[in-house]
Image (cartoon, rainbow, N blue to C red):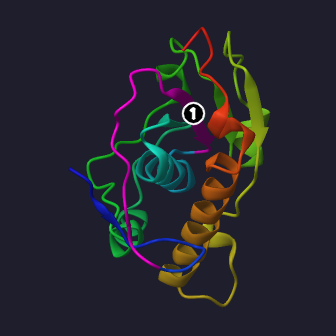
Amino acid sequence: MARERAFNSIDGRTTPCKSASSSRRKKVLFLCAQNAIRSQMAEAFLNCFYGDVYQAFSAGVVPSRVDPLAIDVMSEIGIDISLHRSKGVEEALDNFYDTIVTLCDCARDHCPIFPGTAELIHHEFPSPSSYDNTDRSESYRRVRDEIGTWVESAFGPSSPRYLASPSDFS
């Protein structure tokens, strides 16, 4: 059953989340420092937008807990991450990924080697706490929207990743 998503950076209309219909989806791992905000959002966006093509995961260098404000701002756009949990990168080591995305310098600098990974991307997003003179909710929304827009452009139908076949290691 398709879930509604309230986020569409192109035209603002609601479109359904994609369901997992393909057994050979490309695996993508999003890494950040704590697996509390940015990587959780990226995982949720990719699974919602393109869950029929990709299977997204997330982890952190030093896991903590999923930030309640991240849960709130994702909920505002119809994506529920309330059941997500913060995971350490060591939990992800036993899997093969087609793409690993580091979302902050800490994750890039401490990213372990994943055998069989076809692609490593670094695309830094600011921590919501880095915005000065902005209320906390607004800074989380700004980061959420930046991540959502980037996920659409980096993994959507106009991306070469979208049409590529999953790795033989997946």
Residue 31 painted magenta: yes
Q: Residue furthest left?
A: 1
Say left or right for 20 vs 63. left
Question: In the picture, residue 70 is in which quadrant?
Answer: bottom left
Q: Can I make out residue 36 in this image? A: no
Q: Is residue 23 above or below residue 136?
A: above
Task: Using the image as rendered, state which of residue 100 and residue 33 is in the foreground.
Answer: 100
Residue pictured at 64% horizontal, 68% vertical: 146
Residue found 44% across the figure and 78% down from its top: 13
Residue 167, quarter of the rendered image: top right
Q: Position of residue 43 (x, y in %)?
A: 49, 46
| Residue found at x 54% / y 15% | 170
**Between 162 and 93, the one nearer to me in the picture:** 162
Residue 125: name its quadrant: bottom right
Does any portion of residue 25 appear in the rendered image? yes
Residue depicted at x 49% and y 55%? 41
Tag 1 secondary structure: strand
Where residue 130 sits: x, y (%)? 69, 71
> Which class describes the residues within 10 Å of circle 1: few (<14), some (14-19), or many (20+)?
many
Q: Which residue is mark 1?
A: 29
Tag 1: amino acid = Leu
Q: Position of residue 85 (x, y in %)?
A: 35, 42
Is-magenta flag for residue 14?
A: yes
Magenta range = 13-33
Viewer-proximal residue among 108 and 154? 154
- Residue 62 point in image, percent of width and height: 56, 37
Q: Is residue 94 above or below residue 138?
A: above
Question: Would you say 84 lies left or right of 126 here?
Answer: left
Q: Horizontal placement of 41 versus 78: left or right?
A: right
Does residue 1 appear to the left or right of 89 in the view shown?
A: left
Above/below status of 16 relative to 50: below
